[in-house]
Image (tube, rainbow, N blue to C red):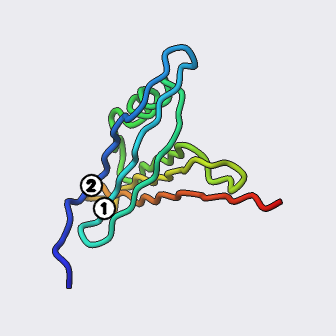
Amino acid sequence: MGAPVKCGIELEVIWFDEVEDLLEVVFRCSNGYFSGQAEIYVSCDVLSKRAKALTGFPSRPDDSRDFELGTFNPDHADGGARMHFFCEDAAGPCSRRSGASRWRTQRTE
């Protein structure tokens, strides 16, 4: 069995275009044993909006928040990430479910 990997979610900016107001980020997530990543294109304000939306989480035991970055459309070359933040029980431990996808399209003529 392989060694455990670092748990958590990471976002790394790998490209920035001021003119187009566009970032390319690498989204990485791991539960300690399984990990995945996707390269995602987002507008510059998307990440700060997502961070603001998580401010104060959790605000109550049944609080949950859902986010999607990028796209899961197979007609686009970039990837996507979905995150679901929630409380496991009324005591308030927070959890998250996340997933990443990298679509590859090939054209045949």
What is the C-alpha distance between the residues marked 2 and 1?
A: 5 Å
Residue 25 falls in which quadrant of the image? top left
Say the numbered circle drawn on residue 30: 1
First along the sequence among labels 2 and 1: 2
Q: Residue lying farthest left?
A: 3
In this view, 55 is above or below 88: above
Residue 56 falls in which quadrant of the image? top left
Q: Residue lying farthest right?
A: 109
The answer to whether any part of residue 75 appears in the image is: yes
- Residue 72 % position (x, y): 62, 54
Give neighbour class at mark 2: few <14, some 14-19, many 20+ (Cα, 10 Å).
few
- Residue 7 % position (x, y): 23, 59
- Residue 45 % position (x, y): 49, 23
Q: Residue at x 39, y 61 (%)?
A: 36
**Residue tagged 2:** 8
Which quarter of the figure is the N terminus placed in? bottom left
Q: Residue lying farthest top?
A: 19
The one of 5 and 83 positioned closer to us in this rendering: 5
Say the numbered circle drawn on residue 82: none
Amino acid type, mark 1: Ser
Q: Residue at x 35, y 32 (%)?
A: 55
Q: Tell me if label 2 and label 1 are in contact, CB under 8 Å.
A: yes
